[in-house]
Image: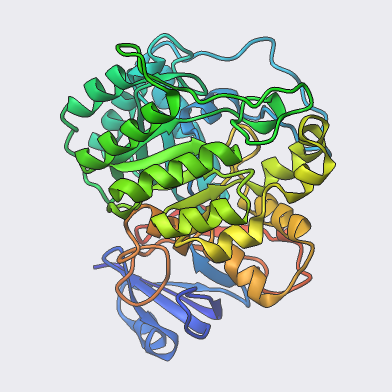
């Protein structure tokens, strides 16, 4: 086995233990830490990396990222950074061939490696988008499988299937048909087709999130869950969809942003135990979750994946339709991270750029505080917590001995208050014990 030893810096395992000065990898796993790692550098054939004071943390896991769409669009994002001048697309790009789909994925994987990202969740691929742009359809799943079978593996992927429309209605009939299909065989440590995405509502700025208090125009939004075979209330349809996914043994991810949608999802999940699945089920976005909704989610065992950078860039827009007071209470970043069984911070790229440093910087801005405890919580929200979401916390997400050799070497300490996250540079990315990016 090839041995790799990183020494002469700071290693944050993010498992609750103290930092170390060195770490050793072999066979795709962490084999030693601190003083125990130093002698391994003298083994014949060992690769030794002198950190020169750099900091090692677990590889970053973006818990919600559309890789094919990102690869097709990059460097364009839906919500451009305020400090850049975007060059607008004339039309949404489409992926029309297997080669184009594969190229989009590999392009994204190169981008992610340079950002220190070693895992991500692809949140919605399947037949519901077979007449769409090609970034989310059944053939994109085939592209993933083909690359996986060829052994092109520089990042670990958790993939959710989508049997409805992206940001649109989903029907019970389509969900039943999708769940009845057999899953392809994969090495789940690299491509884990773990669950199902259900779109329950839209987003607050567009007045499509389902809310209990009216928007500025008097509307409340509506659920996107629809039974096209029987007369049935949409909230009952949502509850049945949640039960169907739970009964199938699959992981459930519900796009829910409005407070009413979140409450309905939590109630249904608690009723049938859907959130107690493995991997655990969760809500995507949870933008307008208040104390009552978070308590209901916690009681049901639901986690959440949130996007602080999107929140920061859309807060003023949202305030125009929900009012400044409700907008100020929306996106309760710290409360979500501290209240739920698990909560992750993600990008939702290409809505915004897939840069976890900007996301964590946005979280600091929204919380309005900067200290070691908060920074550790934020770092775990992009490393250890996503591993919980993936059902993989026993083998990845931290850097204890025996865990996956997924790590990123950073120029500065992300746990040090006052250190601007966006100014930290990625020097090296290691996935499965193999260097997939080196700045030099």
* Drawn side of residue 70 relative to residue 23, left or right: right
Image coords of residue 264 (percent x, y): 47, 40
Q: Residue at x 62, y 34 (%)?
A: 211
**Residue nearest the viewer, comparing 249 with 184:** 249
Looking at this view, is 132 or 401 the one in front? 132
Looking at the image, residue 163 lies above or below residue 17: above
Does 184 sit above or below residue 263?
A: above
> Looking at the rendering, in which quadrant would you find the C terminus?
bottom right
Residue depicted at x 32% and y 20%: 138
Above or below — where is 294 with respect to 31?
above
Q: Is residue 413 visible in this depiction of the protein?
A: no
Residue at figure coordinates x 47%, y 44% from the top left: 283
- Hey, which quadrant is residue 207 in on the image? top right
At which x and y percent is residue 286?
57, 44
Horizontal and vertical percent for residue 281? Answer: 37, 48
Q: Residue at x 47, y 26 (%)?
A: 104
How many numbered marks have been drawn onto this rendered protein structure? 0
Task: Tell me the quarter of the image containing the N terminus.
Answer: bottom left
**Left or right of 216 in this view: 397:** left
Residue 87 on image: x %, y %: 76, 21
């Amino acid at each position: 086995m090839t041995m790799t030893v990183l020494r002469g810096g700071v290693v944050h395992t993010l498992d609750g233990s103290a930092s170390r000065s060195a770490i050793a990898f072999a066979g795709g796993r962490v084999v030693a830490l601190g003083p125990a790692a130093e002698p391994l550098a003298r083994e014949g054939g060992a690769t030794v990396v002198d950190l020169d004071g750099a900091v090692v943390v677990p590889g970053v896991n973006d818990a919600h990222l559309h890789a094919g769409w990102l690869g097709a669009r990059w460097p364009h994002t839906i919500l451009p950074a305020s400090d850049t001048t975007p060059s607008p697309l004339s039309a949404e790009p489409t992926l029309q061939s297997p080669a184009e789909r594969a190229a989009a994925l590999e392009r994204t994987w190169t981008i992610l490696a340079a950002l220190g990202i070693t895992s991500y969740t692809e949140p919605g691929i399947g037949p519901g988008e077979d007449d769409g742009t090609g970034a989310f359809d059944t053939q994109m799943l085939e592209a993933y499988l083909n690359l996986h079978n060829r052994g092109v593996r520089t990042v670990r992927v958790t993939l959710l299937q989508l049997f409805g429309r992206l940001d649109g209605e989903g029907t019970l009939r389509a969900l039943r048909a999708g769940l009845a299909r057999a899953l392809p065989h994969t090495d789940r440590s690299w491509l884990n087709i773990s669950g199902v995405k259900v779109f329950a509502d839209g987003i607050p700025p567009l007045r499509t999130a389902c809310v209990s208090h009216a928007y500025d125009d008097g509307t409340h939004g509506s659920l996107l869950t629809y039974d096209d075979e029987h007369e049935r209330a949409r909230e009952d349809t949502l509850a049945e969809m949640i039960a169907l996914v739970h009964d199938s043994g699959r992981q459930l991810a519900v796009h829910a942003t409005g407070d009413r949608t979140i409450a309905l999802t939590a109630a249904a999940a608690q009723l049938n135990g859907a959130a107690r699945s493995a991997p655990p089920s969760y809500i995507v976005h949870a933008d307008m979750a208040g104390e009552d909704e978070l308590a209901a989610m916690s009681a049901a065992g639901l986690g959440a994946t949130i996007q602080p950078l999107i929140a920061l860039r859309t807060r003023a827009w949202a305030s125009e339709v929900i009012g400044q007071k409700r907008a100020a209470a929306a996106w309760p970043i710290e409360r979500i991270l501290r209240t739920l069984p698990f909560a992750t911070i993600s990008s939702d790229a290409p809505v915004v750029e897939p840069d976890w440093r900007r996301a964590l910087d946005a979280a600091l801005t929204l919380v309005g505080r900067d200290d070691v405890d908060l920074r550790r919580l934020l770092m775990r929200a992009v490393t250890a917590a996503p591993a919980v979401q993936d059902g993989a916390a026993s083998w990845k997400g931290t850097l204890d001995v025996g865990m996956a050799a997924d790590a990123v070497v950073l120029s500065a300490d992300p746990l040090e208050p006052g250190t601007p996250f966006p100014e930290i540079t990625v020097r090296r990315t290691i996935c499965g014990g193999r260097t997939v990016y080196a700045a030099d």
